[in-house]
Amino acid sequence: MRNLVFLSVFLWFSNALIAQNKVKKADSIKPQELDAVMVSATRTKRQMSSLPMPTQFIPQKEIEAINAIRLTDLLDEQTGLITVSDFGGGQGVQMQGLDSQYTLVMIDGVPLIGRSAGTLDLSRVTVGNIKQIEIVRGASSSLYGNEALGGVINIITQNPRPGKRTRIDYRAGSFNTHDLRAQYTDNNLLDQWSVFLNRLSSDGYDLVENDDLRTVEPYTNYTAQVKYKGDLNPLTKMQISGRYYTQKQDYTASSNLAGASDINEFNTTLHLSRTPLEHWTQEFEWYTTRYMATEFLNNPDGSAFSESDFDQWFSRPELRLTRATDSSGTWIGGLGLTYEQLKRTDFFGTPEFYAPYAYIQYEDQITKKLNLVAGARYDVHSAYASQFSPKLAARYRINDKISIKSSLGYGFKTPDFRQLYFDFTNTTAGYTVLGYNAVAVRLPELQAAGNILNVTVPLDSFDDPLRPERSLAFNLGMDIKFSSQIKWNVNLFRNDIKDLIDTRVIAQKTNGQNVFSYYNVNRVYTQGLETDFTARINQNLKFSMGYQYLIAKDKDAEQAFDSGQVFGRVNPSSPVFRLDAKDYLGLVNRSKHTANAKMFFELPQWKLDGSFRATYRSAFGLFDTNGNSYLDQYDDLVAPFAIIDFSLNKALGKKFRIGAGIDNITDYTDPGRLTNLPGRLIYASLTFKTK
Amino acid sequence: MKKQILLTFGLAGLLTFSACSKEDSDTPQNTNNDSVLVSNLYAPQDTDYTQNPPAASGPFVKFDFSTGATTTSDTDWDIAFRGTTILINGGSSSGILDAPQRTGNAGAYIADGIFDEINSINSGAFAQDGPDGLAIPTGSGNGWYTYDPTQLTILPIPGKVIVLRTADNKYAKIEILSYYKDAPQVINEQIALNDLRYYTFNYVYQDDAGASGF
């Protein structure tokens, strides 16, 4: 019914727009959509339409049209990207069916850190000062190394436009949410400055009313970013940027345990680039970041109940050399060193990693029709075996309308600190989790203390180091340009991952609980199809549709189903029956079908612009509910759902703009299971800019 | 829609169930022992959180298959429950606090399959409790249950059937159906925190010590 209403409103708008355009052509704004330039795919500036790997691009215009405030607002609407929350509340993104741990997230080409439970919380990132978001799908470790298994998301911040400019944005909405941004930029002939400040506060929300906990506790956070660009000498350009993020949030664990959590994050980058000779560019980049998170709980009498700290350092100098050949080729090579350190409560020591690396890539327009990118990277690591990650990608232009592209590449993710050095005993349930490298020392200590009943995995199986998780990714796609206004692309993907790290019981304790540790076990694959269709019906109306079909399964689980070792039950009082391969649904939190439809419109005579957007997810399971530890079709699944958003903005003169919108119009929620969906959000916004 | 599916499967399940028992009555091993349902056998456990790691304690609830009821006897019991831990009256102490003395010759193993189809007894497979562990292992995925640490639920693994030699050398097969009061289909957070340690299980008792099946 609601869909019908949506459709009729949509049709009405489309008609209105088409009709208007016929009458008033002179007034329309020229579309900005020339060929987008992106840097993430090859680390050189490249037109998106010439890239041989699947890429996606979100321009600032779209960010403004939907009045987004956080990165999660945007990514959720892109084909094949799904925002999922971990049990700690962090919101990560799933790409090509790979978990959020396997996607590298960067700001201006340098990675964000702070994955305290594996997920990088993307709601941390404000989109106020973003020029564009670049998404590269498929393993990209040949350029970026660790974490780039599923792909890369690179957030490009704005460069100042000429002159002195000030911009202030304010958005207020449901749940007492206030987002205030201020930006000052100065671009004169000599240098460029920009300062950006953001404050976001919210009361959070509570989906389950009859308990002591809130789904999301009230929070306030601030982001500050400063960027300077100037010429050191006629040949050398320098860029310095710094970013600081801080958040305070209430933290309640029960009716008598309350406290707070505190996050502080710093990033600094120094970037020098020099053109010593024609065709040559030298770049030096030194990035350092620190992520600190503390949380505490106090008893009602004010005494401390618990406190935990997380303090991670990451520093990376990198030297890059780019050379354009006399013909059409470009060589790029890089040399760098990553240093990482983590201090954490419940940790075995203060681990440090050193990881030097080198990479090289060559790209060339070999013939008028064939474009090729070949690259490889070698990563050495102080704690793991070295990794070699090659990649090859090619694009072949059949004619003016159709191109075929394909890429094959390796990706890897080294075990994180937690998987190696965790030393944690749950104070209420009594189980223990030991990092892989902590076992050899800590297990004998527990044995000596009389806590261990029996050891089920012998200690010598921890002699060889834990291996990084590796993937081989294949993409095959086609771009079809029916006209400059109507485009369609389709991409088939397959990711084969081995040595995925999971936990297992390594010993039983005298208190009846277990000791867990990590090991390389799972072989997993994800495969499917992603497709986008875009039609610019006229200069004031753009329509797009996206769809992803996804299969994400564990190969060993498939075998267990195949050989009849898995049983199911509909409810506790019904008999058990044997399940077969058809009943296996695959990995948790994967929808077989996801889709989106978006319409962006402009009504120039009223200075209005806005959007209708809808996203859809088919059924998926979050956890096993019938005890066989696999997700099967008899488990309790999250039913299919759609989220519909609407936004409308109006320019008032040249300096002001007002906006309003509703996210999640139908007020869809699933309390207890989808904690990242607060329900309907209504907001209004105001923008002031000097130019 | 969902309900309809459940209903269909429930009905299909019932049909298969009755069909199976008919077939089984033709097989020589089946001696027509009826299955008995035990509901809400409460097996509480005390946990001392002042110790690190916390220690579980408290008396085990003992069950005797020859009477089909719980018992406080020190000798005439076959199987004992406390929290998720299940002991048998055979073997020696495994070091668990407040565990009863083993006085009998019980043994147990876990068979994979459908309860009604587990009809033979593999006498070579019986294990007993001892210092190296329990005949019915504890821990998620090791024995009869899986534990989901995010949902805090203990779910019996379908297809796990405990085959037991009783303390006095008779046999029983046991299928645990639920760990929560009144065996609810959906275990929400309230139930997971408050209504746990109530066993509901099915068993078939074979009182012929010489039998090779149920």
Image (spheres, coloured by chain):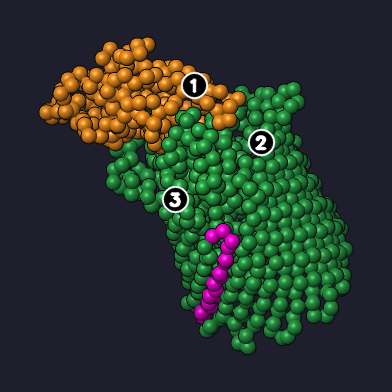
Q: Helix, strand, or loop for circle 1? A: strand
Distance (Cα) linking label 1 and label 3: 33 Å
Which color has been applied to chain A in this rendered view?
Answer: green
Q: Is residue B85 visible?
A: yes
Q: Is residue B120 above or below residue A116?
A: above
Please state the chain letter of the residue tagged with numbered disc 1 in the rendered image. B
Residue B38 screen position, x and y as percent: 34, 17
Q: Can marks 1 and 3 be said to lie on one chain? A: no
Which residue corresponds to mark 3? Answer: A460
Residue A317 screen position, x and y as percent: 70, 67
Residue visible at 72% across and 53% down in the picture: A290
Which residue corresponds to mark 2? Answer: A216
Disc 3 residue type (three-letter) = Asp
Distance (Cα) linking label 2 and label 3: 44 Å
Disc 1 residue type (three-letter) = Ser
Residue visible at 56% across and 80% down in the picture: A364
Q: Is residue A114 above or below residue A472?
A: above
Residue A25 screen position, x and y as percent: 70, 64
Residue A37 - label: none
Which residue corresponds to mark 1? Answer: B57
Disc 2 residue type (three-letter) = Val
A449 vs A254, left or right, is left
* Label pair 1/2, CB-CB below 8 angstroms: no
In this picture, which residue range is highlighted in magenta? Answer: A369-384
Q: Helix, strand, or loop for circle 2? A: loop
